[in-house]
Image: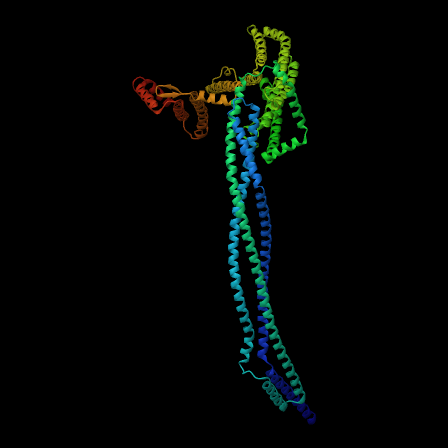
Amino acid sequence: MKKPFKQLVLSSFILISSFIITYIAYAESKTLLPQGENRINSTDINSENKTDINYANESKKVIEQTALIDKNLEIKEREIAELSTYLEDIRNRKTEFESQTNVYKIELTTFGSQLPLPDVDTKLLEKAYMSSQAAVAKLTTDISKLREKNEQLKQGEQIAYEQKMGNDKFLIELKHKGGIENNITSKDAKQQIQPKQDIKSAEPPLAPDQQQSVSFEKQLALGKYGDPQQRAALEQRIDIERQHIEEQKLLEKQKVVDEQKIAEEQKTVLRQLQIRLRYLQTAITKQMLLMQSTHAIINGQIPVLEDIGGKYKTLVGELEVRIRDSKKAELLTRKTNPLTQGTWKRMGEDIRELLSIATSIFELESWKNSFSFLWLSGLHKLISFIVILLIFSIITIRFKILLKRICYSSPHLENRYWSRTVLEIFGRNLLLSAVTAFFYLCIKFKLFFSYSIVGNLIVEILMILIFILWTIYFLENIQKRYPVVPVKELILFLKTLNMVAVIYILLGSALKSDSSIVIGYRLLCEIIFYGWLIYFLKKLMPEMIHYCERKNKTIQMIPIFYKNGVVLAAITGIVLELLGYGTLAFYWYISWGKTVVVIMWSGLIIGASGEWMPAGIHTPPHTDNAHIHLHAKNSFSVLWLIKNISFIVLFFLVTIALMLSWASSDFVFPWLYKILTFKFLVGSMSFSISSIAQAIMILVITHFFARAWRNFFQQHLLGDSGLDHGLQESMTTITVYAIWIFGIFTSLIVFGLNTTTLTVAFGALSIGIGFGLQNIVSNFISGIILL
């Protein structure tokens, strides 16, 4: 048993000894490994990665900046091309601009020379006016375009200058940055080599033969204590170490080469960026030069166009005055009698002129000229006018439908014939009336287009159509109430009159006013109208006389007066035409037609307003409620006041409408203004019709405000106050008196009484109260106390 145990112990000792020797040999071999170089390698790898990342980011940023500069350079080249084209176009059109300005100057001279001539035809003046208006519109458009382009050039030049200054700063930064990058690159190369020298400085650097001798000494030392296998393993490890050192050296050399290559690439990228920036600076400088050249040319053209435009505007104002005066003078200007031989000889020439105008309508070239004229005058304005007109028409149609619904479904209009008639006539012709009013306002205030001859022609035709339709609708409603009137003949006559009037307006616009065709057509129409009038009166008069005899004997003379007046008006027109006052004859008939329409509408409005006004106070009998009686009385007084004011306003409006029927608005409104503002001097005080009307209006407003205040103050402010009824009445009465005192005082000042007069009047009133009106004042105050 002892021998196996000894063998076991011996074998265990040998195993343990072998393990210890092996561990010592392993530990000894670990000391031979270059641990510092391992650390250096890991550090070098991390630093190398960081450097590569920094270089990559920097290069990426530079590439992005280069791409952005290339994009800006492309944009600048496109802008330079556009500027060059625009500048070349302006330079090429310089001769055209000078010729156009010469045409404007010649036209101004020609039109200006026509103004002093006394016998210039109104049609020529209107054509000159239209041409001048179109020239003003075109010049205004051209000047606005040039100013807009000039402003764009100024802004572009400022932006280009700021961009150029920024690029200069960036170029300086790039140059400075290129020097810093070179320094950084050399420092990085030194820092990549320096760690190896520092780490090996812990032990003095050894030559390769010395390092080999050291390794051999270590091998010999190991050979003393190790077996041959350990020595072979150690030799193999030493060979691996040597190969690793050689590889590290190669990697370091490759790293230095790569760093130099990256530095060169970065320099190349920066150099390309600088070149692109210089190209961009050159393009910006060229763009600024082109802008300055274009700016100089535009600054030279704008004053010339502004001067011509100012002269045209002055000419337009003078032509407006001259056309208005010429139309007034034509009314009293005697022209050639249409029955004389000279006028009939011109008939052939006028017919040929009319045929040439009619054939030119169907020519394509005339339409091209018309559209080009519209384009020069502002086609975009015409399109805007059409769009707004459509919107306005749609709104008017909706309102027309609403009026029609009110006429046929409202219970308030069942027993009010004239009110329903007014709404029906107004509603049936509402769309055409609204369109005509829109056209008239656009022409009057020059909203969308400046040329007015075509617009005035359209407005005249539409107004004649509106007047005739009003009359037709009125006759249709009158026949339902007064069947004695032969409405069918009148309606047929009015429709024929509409067609005849439109033809005359078109002939008058195409030919001269003294043309034999215009004069002959007008005379023929006047003779036919007189014959039809005699026929109609013979048919109408017996029925009118019989109807008047049945109604009232006092109006038997009205039909005879009506017949003689109508016949006299028709004969007067023919006589004026034969005497050579054809324009005055046409104005005579047109004015009578307007007068008939005004009388028709005034009668309709008077009849409609009378249906809404009560005849008197209708208080229930045997009533003991004083408030109800007072309310009915006050309501009647207000309605009576409204009725009388409405009739006064209506009389004033009808008077103005009749004046406008026989005179132009340029004469009527200034004349009315002079009458209304004419001062009547009474001592040191001055009065006028307008001041009297304003004083009355202030009193009316005071009356309504006092009534509304009484109800509001008594019901809403004092209703829940808990005060006695008498105290509430007193406070309400005092406030109403205060309102009336303020209103009367204001109306007296507006009426024309100055403060000195009012002071004297109130002083006299105070003396009167002190001496003779003591009882009245005391009774007044007692009444308030009793309230």
Q: Residue furthest bottom?
A: 3
The residue drawn where x is 53% and y is 80% is 201
Quarter of the figure with the C terminus = top left
147, 398: nearer the viewer:
147
- As drawn, 448 above or below 168: above
- Residue 560: image quadrant is top right
The residue drawn where x is 58% and y is 79% is 35
359, 610: nearer the viewer:
359
Quarter of the figure with the N terminus = bottom right
- As drawn, 166 above or below 222: above
The x and y percentages for residue 565 are 57, 10
The number of numbered discs placed on residues in the rendered structure image is: 0
530, 627: nearer the viewer:
530
The x and y percentages for residue 539 are 64, 9
533, 622: nearer the viewer:
533
- Does residue 281 appear anywhere in the picture? yes
- Residue 264: image quadrant is bottom right
- Residue 210: image quadrant is bottom right
